[in-house]
Image (cartoon, helix red, strand yellow):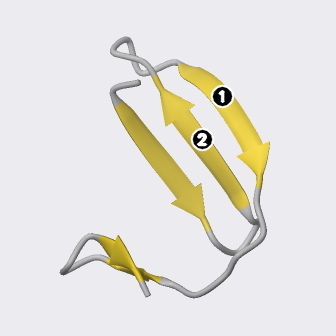
């Protein structure tokens, strides 16, 4: 997968291929939060 997108409000994560097409979409359970400066979960 070339990139991913996380939507915490809808609890959805999507993974996209090199052609920018969604390959996988899944419902998730949010635990913690994402720190964009450190590019990690807290």
Q: Are marks 2 and 1 in contact (CB under 8 Å)?
A: yes
Q: Quadrant of residue 30?
A: bottom right
Numbered disc 2: secondary structure: strand
The residue indicated by pointer 1 is 24
Q: Quadrant of residue 25?
A: top right
Instruction: State whether residue 7 is above or below residue 2.
Output: below
**Marks 2/1: CA–CA distance:** 6 Å
Give x and y (percent) for residue 11.
74, 65
Q: Is residue 37 shown left or right of residue 20?
A: left
Q: Quadrant of the N terminus?
A: top left
- Image label count: 2
| Number of other residues with Cα within 10 Å of mark 2, as a class: few under 14, some 14 to 19, many 20 or more | some
Give x and y (percent) for residue 9.
70, 75
The residue shown at (43%, 18%) is 17
Mark closest to the chain's N terminus, 2 or 1? 2
Give x and y (percent) for residue 2.
33, 27
The residue shown at (60%, 20%) is 23
Instruction: State whether residue 9 is above or below residue 16.
Output: below
Instruction: State whether residue 36 is above or below residue 27.
Output: below
Q: Quadrant of residue 32?
A: bottom right
| Number of other residues with Cα within 10 Å of mark 1, as a class: few under 14, some 14 to 19, many 20 or more | few
Residue occupying the far left of the picture: 37
Give x and y (percent) for residue 26.
75, 43
Q: Is residue 39 shown left or right of residue 12?
A: left
The residue shown at (19%, 80%) is 37
Q: Quadrant of the C terminus?
A: bottom left
- The image's mark for residue 14 is 2
Numbered disc 1: secondary structure: strand
* 24 or 42: nearer the viewer: 42
Q: Is residue 22 shown left or right of residue 38?
A: right
- The image's mark for residue 33 is none
């Amino acid at each position: 997968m070339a990139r991913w997108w996380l939507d915490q409000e809808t609890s959805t994560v999507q993974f996209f291929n090199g052609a920018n097409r969604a390959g996988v979409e899944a419902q998730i359970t949010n635990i913690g939060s994402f720190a964009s400066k450190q590019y990690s979960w807290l």
